[in-house]
Image (cartoon, rainbow, N blue to C red):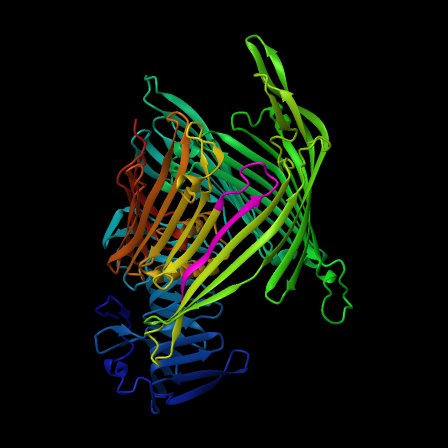
Amino acid sequence: METNSRGTTVTNDTSKNELQDTSKNNFKQVSGQDTVHMQDDGGLETVVTISANDSSWNEVSKNILHLFKGAKVKYEGFELAADYIRLDRNTNILFASGVIDHNGKYVGRPVVIMPGESPIAVDSLLYNYKSQVPKTYGVMTEVDGGYIQAREVRKNIYDEMSLYKGLYSTCDLPYPHTHFGIQISKGVITQKQIIAGPSYLVVENIPLKFIAIPFGFFPKQDKKSSGFLFPSFGEDASRGFAMRDLGWYLTFNDYWDSEIRGNLYSKGTWEASVRTQYLVNYKFSGNFNIRYGSFVEGVEGTPSYGRSKDFNFTWNHTQRQEANPGTSFTASVNFGTRSYLQNSAAGGTYDPRALTNNRLNSSIAYGKVFADGKVNFTSNLRHEQDLTTGRVTLDLPTISLNVATFNPFDSKDRVGEQKWYQKLTVGYSMQAQNKIVTFDTLLFRKETLQDFTNGMQHNIPVSLSLNVLKYFQFNTSANYTERWYLQSVRNRVANEVFGYSTVKDTIQGFKRAYDYNLSSGLSTKVYGMYPKMGKIEGIRHVITPSVNLNYRPDFGRERYGYYRNFIDENGVNRNYSIFEGSLYGSPSEGRSLGIGFSVDNNIEAKVRDDNDTTGNGFRKMPIIQGLTFSGNYNMAADSLKLSTISFSGRTSLFKEKLNLNFNGTFDPYTYDPYTGRTINRYAIKDGKLARLTNFGLSFDYSFNPEANKNRNNNMDSLRNSMPNLSPEQAQALSRISTDPNAFVDFNIPWNVAASVSFNYARVFDSQEQRMRSVLTNTVNVHGDFNVTPKWKIQYNTGFDFVQMKASLTNISIYRDLHCWDMSVGWVPFGQYKSYNITIRAKASILQDLKLSKRQSHFTF
């Protein structure tokens, strides 16, 4: 045996001349194909198929065949491919090896497939295809992302393998360049177990024989098994030395398993979690996680010292559509105490997005489609929690039933076009809700159940659309709404010790309220063309004006019973609705007879494309998209007849790389300078056409649009390659979807993206008794760049120009170590100033084998 320059072992069963390839054409077609007929032990004739891409040499006198470049041999379930194969027909022995190319590299290693096993790469091989006993040198095989290499492996007739001088590592190179592995002196591998002799750790090519075991026994299981989860160790500035993620893995069957983990700190803080995932192929999958912690705060012996107990619960469930067509069920639940994320450092992740999150949301939804898709039923349980104030909103449940619009006067047997009355459409929708708004400290009290409010709303729209006078679209509609409630309110004045006060009583009992409105209108399109200007061949302007007449009766009249009067504590006669604070509101008081109007504008240019080689190519360039002005004039109102004028629009610039959106509101009336209330006086009388009361502008731009495209492709590929995601993988994929910096792609050399948000509003300051402007203006910049092909730096920062301070800034550094990777995260300043360093093996089976160093942001 001899060792080549790359540390590869090759047997001495062949001479150098036999390994040399005299052919100059490496792409030559098969120069020969041979078959060897022989009999097996049962007397049946079998065939050995032999081929070579380059050349073959048959020593007739010795009955030996030599094959070069891309040689292949097939015999029953045995397959072999290598750049050199020698077949000795006298002894029925195959020898295979690679060759040394003109660069002095050992290439074309044999790849062998034994009966019933996966492919194995070796340096060289001896195989008796009659007795089917192989002997391999320089073996490399993969087991769940880990690689086993051995200098010599033999296989006996009992399907047992003996290995000599083996190495286990996570690197797929012949000589692991991370120099980290477990050296096994001798070992026996059977179908169900591995028996290893003396074994020791090797780091940076240094054998650590003092960290060795005399022998080892490892069961080979083809199914999940329960076991110990090794912890990681560290130190926290405020909580002391830590032992994190100590636990036990439990597997129950092929459908669900659990992890029980805990964190212990030397100063008394502890955390525990139970994470469970389940999966039924082609039906549904999900996971839930319960986390509880007891956190010590402050320094013992000081007034700030104390202990807080927090918990968090998450549940995610997804149902496959093909499992039950027409029915859907999904769940995304996340609730807990308001201080859990801050006290636990976002569950130990130190994730800035989770640390700054001030809301938790949950949703459990069920849907069913009936009547060939014409009827859709949905039911939803929702939860929303404000972590800042502790305010909790629960919808238990929200129900919706929608019937698709249909033509009641049309016929399936109709011949010809629809008559005008056959175009009449009718629809129906129903919503029901049971809701409570309270605080997390009061949520689980018995009396809280009495605070639920509920109601049901029915809506029936009727509409008709016709073409009139060739160029106009006539639309008329009627909408009927009915509300059902189980509570109503009554206002009264109570005599108190220091005077009178207004009291609102809730009256239990069924109440109904209905209203309706009518509307008719005309709309059309006006097209305008502007002449050619330079490279612009033409500009098209599409104006869509519409006007409608709308009517609604006065449902505040006494005969409806929806509104009542009472004398308040100041002796003033006040009007109020008995449905104040109800879920679907109250019918509006006051008669309305108005004229609604809107104007929509779209402007686009036809520009000559300089990249078109024919010279006749053009591209469309949007200038203004959806610039809309709308308002209403109520002729039945006694004052303030004209509503505010709303406008909105959007456009794209730089070949649609930059998207810009804007919106705002104009008030045509002026205001009382002492109260800030709008008065019945047009602003134009004071020299202003209208008052701009609010305006919003936002845009985003990526200087390298290929980065977003490649990131989306990578995420799609990741989802397709991992159909059964673990909770960690699902969480990582969710983080990638929401965070542009969460995906590390070394194929994109750089990316810079920015977004700007600006909002302006005019509000009345009651203390200063004047109008003042409220501004928000923020800029966010994120991106990444490659320092070298293996080093990448990512950044995410921003600045609030109103508060004049930077937003959360995060810098990440990644290093690709081939079979390992390293990441450094750094928040350089602010409340969550911290850093973490992680070195992790890429092999899926060794994801818990990692070295992590963190600096906590907790300081006291």
> Residue 554 in the image: x percent, y percent?
67, 37
What is the magenta range?
A: 621-645
Prevailing SS of the magenta stretch: strand
In this rendering, the answer to whether 535 lies above or below 295 is: below
Q: Is residue 69 above or below residue 467?
A: below
| Residue under the image location 62 percent in, 59 percent down | 322
| Vertical side of 658 occupied by 446: above or below | above
Find residue 119 and report its horizontal and vertical position in percent.
Answer: 42, 68
- Left or right of residue 145, residue 630 in this image: right
| In the foreground, 342 or 669 | 669
Q: Is residue 599 magenta?
A: no
Magenta residue check for 630: yes
The residue lying toward the viewer, choosing from 427 and 691, is 691
The quadrant holding residue 304 is top left
For the point 62% across and 16% down, which residue is it? Answer: 493
Q: Is there any visible trace of residue 191 in the rendered image?
A: no
Q: Position of residue 498 (x, y in %)?
A: 54, 9
Quadrant of the image containing the N terminus? bottom left
Q: Residue furthest front?
A: 685
Between 32 and 549, the one nearer to me in the picture: 549
In the figure, residue 83 lies in which quadrant? bottom left
Q: Is residue 748 left or right of residue 486?
A: left
